[in-house]
Image: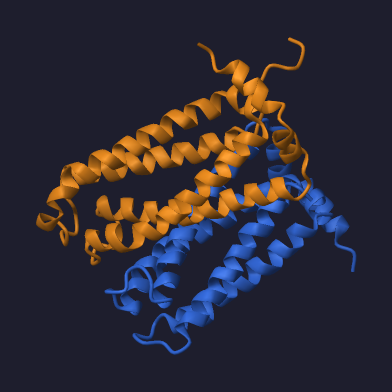
Chain colours: A orange, B blue
Amino acid sequence: MSPLPLIQQLDQTAGSIALRESILVYPLIETTHVLALCLFLGIIALLDLRLLGLGFQSVPVSQIAGRLLPIGLTGFALMTLSGLLLFYSGPLRAYGNIFFRVKMVLILLAGLNAVAFHYGIYKRIAAWDTQPVPPPRARLAGLASLILWCAIVICGRMQAYNWFEKPPGT
Amino acid sequence: MDLLPLFQSFEATAVGTIVRESLWLFPVIECGHLLALALLGGSMLVVDLRLLGLGLTAQPIPQLAARAHPWMLAAWAGIIATGIPMFLSEAVKCYYSPPFWYKIGLLVLASVYTFTVRRRVTAQPQPRLGALTALASLTLWGGVGFAGRWIAFY
């Protein structure tokens, strides 16, 4: 079953139309999305760099994951909320956009990577918390997260350009 | 003094022309700009949060600032290096864009502040007015990001 009819319906709701035509609210939501990205992705990047053994090596991993990451997750909540509103402002356009689709898959993969890390090697954090270079599985999780989130940002940005959209009437 | 001719000549530079005439160059540079922005956010926040008594509170401030500094510097350089070609490609549009002028003003303020006042404050183990230093930093850089996003709209 295709979700297309539902998306077409959503695209024609008064709220959706008002949002994409608004002069102030739409830019404000996009700005929130970008600033929340700095908060969330910036902190995720620090954790990933630490996991890779590339930065903040004197800081125990558990301090970054336990004390800094929760602050970053408020950024994630803001990103999700503003992202949902951005989707609502043009569901049909997003649905047909290849970058949007790839982005959604990549976010899912980043989530799975985070869950696998949390319930995997991070369970034994006490054994490697202060090691300047964490064990291979932790490094792999950091590398995967860094690559995935960079790709997600790139897809998100590219989504705004309509290279792959079919011109109207074709 | 009228700066418009200067901005027109910026737009006529080889770099400006190449970026403007390319379909994909501007978006690709924009991606780099965003990724550098995220790194700048992280490397700034980790220290500003610490100054506010949040996050990595078990770490001494000077050490944390020293660890964050190379990443912050790299991110700052990345933002400038990607920002310049984007600006050159649409310098005249920027000239007429109020958010652009706010952004540049805030960027200069934020950069000078970061490399002078903030640098000196974060070198102290127990700085006085640490929270104020962090709030000023967050406000200035938040303002740069905010104004930057609005160049696309106004």
User: Can you see residue B92?
Assistant: yes
Front in this rendered view, residue B34 or B83: B34
Q: Is residue B116 left or right of residue B24?
A: left
Q: In the drawing, does residue B29 fall left or right of residue A58?
A: right
Spot occupied by residue A164 in the image (x, y as percentages of width and height): 63, 21
Q: Residue furthest bottom?
A: B128
**Res A50 quadrant in image:** bottom left
Place of residue A62 in the rendered image (x, y in percent of width and height, measured from the top left): 23, 60
User: x, y percentage for residue A132?
Assistant: 19, 59
Give the residue at x 62% y 39%. A86
Is B98 displayed left or right of A125 in the figure? Answer: right
Instruction: Name the residue rendered at 52%, 51% in the picture.
Output: A78
Q: Is residue A100 above or below residue B31?
A: above
Residue that extends furthest to the right in the rendered view of this protein: B2
Q: Which quadrant of the figure contains the C terminus of chain A?
A: top right
Residue placed at 49% from the left, 53% from the top? B38
Tell me where residue A114 sits by quadrant.
top left
Position of residue B140 relative to residue B131, above or below, is: above
Which residue is at a point 37% across and 44% down the rendered structure image?
A: A146
